[in-house]
Image (spheres, rainbow, N blue to C red):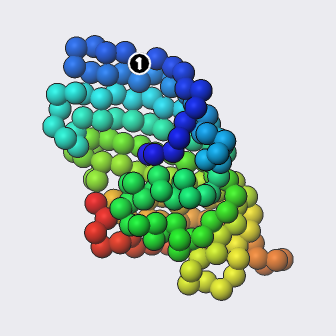
Amino acid sequence: FPIPLVDAHGRVRLYDDVVLLEGLQASIDPQAGGGTVALDGRIETLAAAGEETTLDIRATDVRFNDHLRTALDALLHDAGDLYDRLSPTGTAVVNVNVRPRRQLAGGWSVEVEPRGATMQWANFPFLLEGLRGTVAVRASGASCDLAGHHGDGKLLLRGRVPLAADSP
């Protein structure tokens, strides 16, 4: 998840062939929009590719910008298509989970929780403001459960968003 981090601290331990990441915390570089990141996990260095990593990453106050778009593309391999279709601005909480593929199809999941953000869905003519809810993305696709408003009107956006055909 290639977002530049600064001021990282926490504990990294090596036990035999297992790397434990405990209580790692960092700030997202202010030039990348700011925010904070917490990470815990383990990497089993002798496990097969796709089966070696368990990570839980929680980033707060993450700004919707090109850095987040690039980071999401690193997982989705969609050239930023989903991000561009949503066209978000503002901030969010971002949760990334990496698991062995035997536990989670594709090996990863991402949940983006907008915090009063705005969005202009490519196929919907209105700017949605004050967004709250979740966009959950997995290798199998993305689902939205968002609430917001356009002027005085309240809007809900719920459903599934297909990803690019070549997504992992």
The answer to which image quadrant residue 47 occupies is top left
Across and down, in percent, residue 20 comes to: 36, 21
Q: Is residue 159 left or right of residue 128?
A: left
Residue highlighted by disc 1: 12
Q: Quadrant of residue 65?
A: bottom right
Quarter of the picture holding the N terminus: top left
Who's the residue at 46% across and 17% down the image?
A: 11
| Residue 16 percent across, percent down from the top left | 22, 14
Whether residue 52 is visible: yes
Circle 1 packing at 10 Å, graded few (<14), some (14-19), many (20+), is: some
Residue in the picture at 58% in, 32% down: 6
Give the camera-side residue of 143 and 62. Answer: 62
Residue 166 position (above or below residue 7): below
Residue in the foreground of this view, choosing between 132 and 71: 71
Q: Secondary structure at mark 1?
A: strand
Q: Answer with left or right where residue 81 lies relative to residue 16.
A: right
